[in-house]
Amino acid sequence: MFFADDVTKPDLYGPFWLCTTLILTMAVAGNMGAMFAFVPTTDQKVFLYNFSKLSVASTLLYGYIAVIPLIGWAVSKWVLAAPFGLIDLVCIYGYALTVLIPAAVICVIPLEIVRWLVMILAFGVSVKFITRNVKDVVMRQLDDNRALMVLGAVGGLHLLLVLFLKMYFYY
């Protein structure tokens, strides 16, 4: 588990730079993947870079590691007797994005089956990291049905993120 190794003061340095690295990697790799898959036509003879991918990645990913942990923290304060710390959740969600960096690089390969498999694998690893780190707190304080609903919501939101990244950057 993330906080099992005597981490008493989580920092925001790692999640910020991992997220920033992922943003730049997604924008560059998304354009490279589109360039490698580009086939000239009579309407479009040269490949044009899509610089809006950088702003979409920035908004989505910085928003994700800020808003989702904030919502999780607020809900845990309302529902749980011993809620999560906000910085702890930001760290968990930020570090969970780590596996998407090499996945973004691999997705430059212009084969849809490879891209889907890589993104599914990256989702599995990152959602396992998130749920593993929140499961114990949730399971101790909620009945099984409510705990599964919370963990399902966590996984569902993360699935939406990964699906959007796949569909927008590697169509």
Image: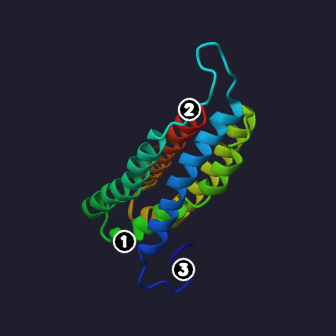
Q: Tell me the SS state at disc 3.
A: loop
Q: Amino acid at mark 2?
A: Leu
**Residue 62 percent across, percent down from the top left:** 39, 55
* Residue that numbered label 2 is attached to: 48
Instruction: Name which residue lies at 33% across and 54% down.
Output: 67
Name the mark nearer the viewer: 1 or 3.
1
Q: Are marks 1 and 3 in contact (CB under 8 Å)?
A: no
Question: In this view of the protein, can residue 135 be seen by the observer?
Answer: no
**Residue 128 percent across, percent down from the top left:** 59, 57
* 9 lies above or below 36: below
* 56 lies above or below 88: above
Name the mark nearer the viewer: 2 or 1.
2
Q: Which mark is residue 4?
A: 3
* Residue that numbered label 1 is attached to: 87
The mark nearer the N terminus, 2 or 3, is 3
Pointer 2: residues within 10 angstroms few (<14), some, or many (20+)?
few
Question: In this view of the protein, can residue 16 be seen by the observer?
Answer: yes
Q: Amino acid at mark 1?
A: Ile
* Cα gap from disc 2 to disc 3, whole angstroms: 47 Å
Instruction: Name which residue lies at 56% across and 32% down.
Output: 48
* 66 lies above or below 34: below
Q: Tell me the SS state at disc 2.
A: loop
Q: Which mark is residue 130?
A: none
Q: Amino acid at mark 3?
A: Ala
Instruction: Name which residue lies at 41% across and 73% down.
Output: 12
Pointer 3: residues within 10 angstroms few (<14), some, or many (20+)?
few
